[in-house]
């Protein structure tokens, strides 16, 4: 069973490395070319759908033409933006950092799974790999939070002027942050395991 799980994870890591990562790089190149040619791009802005003092009413055709009441529902606004130099630098920075972090997590996960297949988990290299993975996950969470702050500064006034129905979402991904902290603790377990293994080998 354990071998099956490890093989399954290795397949997922390989797909991420050989398929998803190249697709992200190609997407980044396309976005960069589009922005350099002066074409407006579609900027995704996570928002809360809200209306002061009232519920937002949407027709629900699947519910016998009745309406459903929604309040503070999450969504994504797709806004056409003409990039300035500052916006272009910001977008490319966030995109480049996201690709770098994804590549780092995938690379170290693949190397870690290879050692698990070889039944050599408690090594100094695996301790470092787990620590890098945890740092990259926490960094990705912080980048998402900073990106939310940037979107808030960029679009909040325009959305208020448009009726305050949409409010820019700024939040911290607590689940990814928790996963990063758990992996960091797991790295310490691997470090301790490697230390005990080295001490036993020196005694023998």
Image: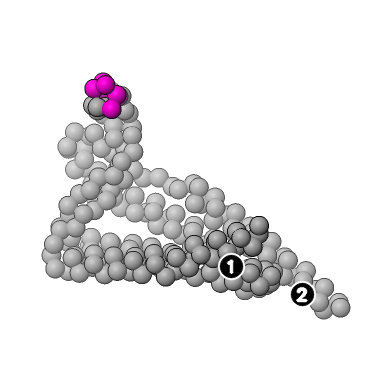
SS of the residue under disc 2:
helix
In the rendered view, tell whether residue 96 sits above or below residue 73: below
In the rendered view, tell whether residue 75 sits above or below residue 33: above
Question: Which residue was labeled with disc 1?
Answer: 113
- Tell me which label, 1 or 2, sits earlier in the chain: 1
x then y, percent, for residue 197: 77, 71
- Which residue is depicted at the point 17% across and 37% down? 162
Residue 46 visible in the picture: yes
x then y, percent, for residue 147: 34, 54
Question: Which residue was labeled with disc 2?
Answer: 198
- Which residue is depicted at the point 69% across and 61% down? 189
Tell me, yes or no, whether the highlighted magenta stretch contains residue 67.
yes
Tell me, yes or no, whether the highlighted magenta stretch contains residue 99.
no
Whether the residues at callouts 1 and 2 have beta carbons within 8 Å, the answer is no
Quadrant assignment, res 141: bottom left
| Quarter of the image where the C terminus is located | bottom right
Of residues 2 and 29, the one nearer the viewer is 2
In the rendered view, tell whether residue 183 sits above or below residue 128: above
x then y, percent, for residue 92: 29, 65
Q: Can you tell which of label 1 and label 2 is closer to the viewer?
A: 1
- Which residue is depicted at the point 45% across and 48% down? 173
x then y, percent, for residue 124: 66, 73
SS of the residue under disc 1:
helix
Left or right of residue 16, residue 83 in this image: left
């Amino acid at each position: 069973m354990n071998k099956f799980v490890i093989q399954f994870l290795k397949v997922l890591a390989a797909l991420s490395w050989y398929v998803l990562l190249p697709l992200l790089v190609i997407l980044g190149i396309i976005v960069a070319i589009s922005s350099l040619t002066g074409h407006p791009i579609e900027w995704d802005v996570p928002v809360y759908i809200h209306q002061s003092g009232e519920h937002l009413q949407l027709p629900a055709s699947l519910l016998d033409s009745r309406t459903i009441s929604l309040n503070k529902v999450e969504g994504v606004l797709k806004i056409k933006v003409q990039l300035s130099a500052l916006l272009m630098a910001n977008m490319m920075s966030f995109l480049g950092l996201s690709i770098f972090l994804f590549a780092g997590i995938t690379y170290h996960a693949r190397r870690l799974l290879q050692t698990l297949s070889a039944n050599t988990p408690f090594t100094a290299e695996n301790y470092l790999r787990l620590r890098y993975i945890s740092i990259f996950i926490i960094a990705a969470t912080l980048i998402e939070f900073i990106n939310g702050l940037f979107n808030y500064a960029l679009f909040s006034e325009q959305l208020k002027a448009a009726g305050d129905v949409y409010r820019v979402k700024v939040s911290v991904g607590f689940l990814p942050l928790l996963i990063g902290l758990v992996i960091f603790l797991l790295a310490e377990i691997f470090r301790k395991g490697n230390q005990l293994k080295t001490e036993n080998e020196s005694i023998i």
